[in-house]
Image: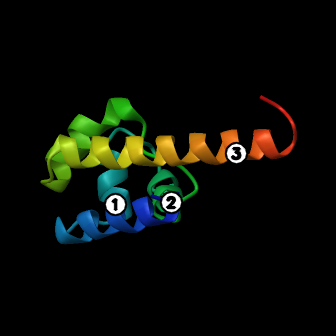
Amino acid sequence: MKTTEYGRMMQDYRKKAGLTQADLAYALGFTSAQFISNLERGICKLPIRHIPKAAKILKVSEKTLIEAHFKIVHDETLIRMRSSKRRGKQ
């Protein structure tokens, strides 16, 4: 999963919950909607410590958000490993 796919998924959940970016940001304890904007554009991931609260707010299972989060981490790790091998680093 790419972070852009994750971002679109999070945006879909937010919209289905009837929330604005600002609503979700403030509910999660952020002071600005900018973090949610960055999240939805695939610039960053939701910190793990926020997953339980986000799942409750978005009315999705924690498992769904955790699996998506770790799928990104797994895929990013594989990409870095392959890139290192191509450059002769191991």
- Between the residue at mark 3 and the residue at mark 2, the CA separation in whole angstroms equals 16 Å
Q: How is the image coloured?
A: rainbow
Task: Give the percent coordinates (x, y) of residue 63.
Answer: 20, 42
Give the mark toward the camera: 1 or 2.
Answer: 2
For badge 2, the amino acid type reads Lys
Q: Secondary structure at mark 3?
A: helix
Q: Is residue 2 above or below residue 68?
A: below
Give the mark toward the camera: 3 or 1.
Answer: 3
For badge 1, the amino acid type reads Met
In the image, 60: left or right of 15?
A: left
Q: As rendered, which of 18 and 88 lies closer to the eye?
A: 88
- Which residue lies at the image location 27% right of the left edge and 63% below the top edge? 14
- Which residue lies at the image location 18% right of the left edge and 70% below the top edge? 16
- Which residue lies at the image location 14% right of the left edge and 47% below the top edge? 61
Q: Secondary structure at mark 2?
A: loop
Q: Are marks 3 and 2 in contact (CB under 8 Å)?
A: no
Task: Give the percent coordinates (x, y) of residue 6.
Answer: 41, 59
Q: Quadrant of residue 20?
A: bottom left
Q: Secondary structure at mark 1?
A: helix
The residue to which callout 2 is attached is 2
The residue to which callout 3 is attached is 82
- Between the residue at mark 3 and the residue at mark 1, the CA separation in whole angstroms equals 28 Å
Q: As rendered, which of 83 and 58 lies closer to the eye?
A: 83
The residue to which callout 1 is attached is 10
Q: As rendered, which of 6 and 83 lies closer to the eye?
A: 83
- Which residue lies at the image location 52% right of the left edge and 48% below the top edge? 75
- How many residues crowd around disc 2 within 10 Å: few (fewer than 14), some, or many (20 or more)? few
| Mark count | 3
Q: Which mark is residue 61?
A: none
Q: Is residue 14 above or below residue 73?
A: below
In the image, 8: left or right of 61?
A: right
